[in-house]
Image: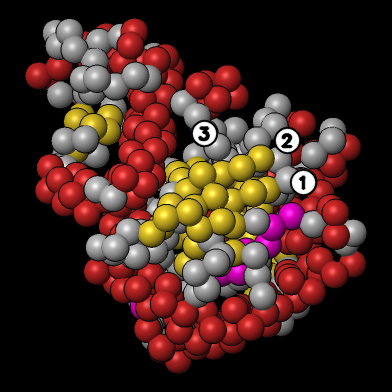
Amino acid sequence: MFELLKTDPSSQARRGRITTRRGVIETPVFMPVGTQATVKAVSREELIEINAQVILGNTYHLFVRPGTDVIGRLGGLHRFMHWDRPILTDSGGFQVFSLAKLRKITEEGVHFRSHVDGAPCFIGPETSMEIQHTLGSDIVMAFDECPPHPCTHEDAARSLALTLRWERRSLDWWDRVEPSRRPLLFGIVQGGSHADLRKESACELVKMGWDGYAVGGVSVGEPEPEMMLAVESAVPWLPTEKPRYAMGLGTPPQMVEMVARGIDMFDCVLPSRAARHGTGYTHRGTINLKNGEYLADPGPVEADCLCYACRSYSRAYIRHLIKSEEILGVRLLTMHNLHFYINLMTQVRRAIEVGTFAEFRRQFVANYVVNKAA
């Protein structure tokens, strides 16, 4: 399931390999977000071209629309969206708490109203597992509660206790499923910004025996040092022989730093979200193509980039499309940004393999400058 291939002597960085029922995932890996059964603005063929190994779907959004019954009748999420590589699905917990209207949390689960049409809905641990099973997910996330930031120790502890009970029920649900149809199951470490709760969460999850472990409740508005602390407080208590996933992260430097702290898997909406605002990613940092300096710039978004957008079009042309609100501009910039994120992890893997990760990390973080408009 997870094979640890190489470790970096200067940090906790790891080179690994996850084997799922629909293919192998080389780690560290960035996973494009396909919340609504699509990675925004790009096709399956384009995802294959940029070597997306695994993508995300979301239980909450697909449950609300078009509905689990529809996707189930059409053969599952892979067939529905014409994707034959691995899919990881979030449990829906984060979206329930961030999007749902009039939610009520009980021991059973969460009663809420759909953000789409206001219809009454319910998702609990068993419901979430059933939905993900019907979707045909290759990596299934436990159902958890994501506490807000800031959150007092008392509130975070209460939330964690409920989450651990929900995660136990999530894992138990799979006992009724034929082992050959069982996906990889990941528990989620919670605990807010409190190191002792992160440790407690990690240790309790390890006792349950998950196939992998995620650090959740990060990138929810907390300062970056707290984000790093949440990971640092969890990783030492997680087994080295299982994959580790930092949910919803992050910027390119954050991902490199998280790799150095022992994280193997990442997802983030930034590549497509930034593209919709005219922002492109480069190894020197972000650039805002809406700026006048790119009006007649004949160069690609990033020199030496091998993505389709950079091989075929200039900054000036993509800028023109974006300023004219043409869909193609967003598509091209999204393709480039996703390629950048995926290729960054390819470079990280190579650096770990050949023993140059420390220097790669130092140079990349030092040279990366964030455009404040990004």
Front-most of residues 116 and 79:
79
Front-most of residues 90 and 212:
212
Q: Secondary structure at mark 3?
A: loop
Q: Secondary structure at mark 2?
A: helix
Q: Nearer the viewer, mark 1 or mark 3?
A: 3
Q: Is residue 127 magenta?
A: no
Can the viewer see residue 65?
no
Q: Is residue 187 magenta?
A: yes
Residue that appears at 81% across and 49% down: 134
Name the residue type under label 3: Ala
In the drawing, does residue 345 fall left or right of residue 237?
A: left
Mark closest to the chain's N terminus, 2 or 3: 3
Name the residue type under label 1: Gly
The boundaries of the magenta stretch are 183-193
Q: Are marks 2 and 1 in contact (CB under 8 Å)?
A: yes
Which residue is most to the front?
Answer: 354
Residue that appears at 15% across and 17% down: 294
Q: Quadrant of the C terminus?
A: top left
Residue that appears at 53% across and 27% down: 47
Q: Which residue is mark 3?
A: 52
Mark closest to the chain's N terminus, 1 or 3: 3
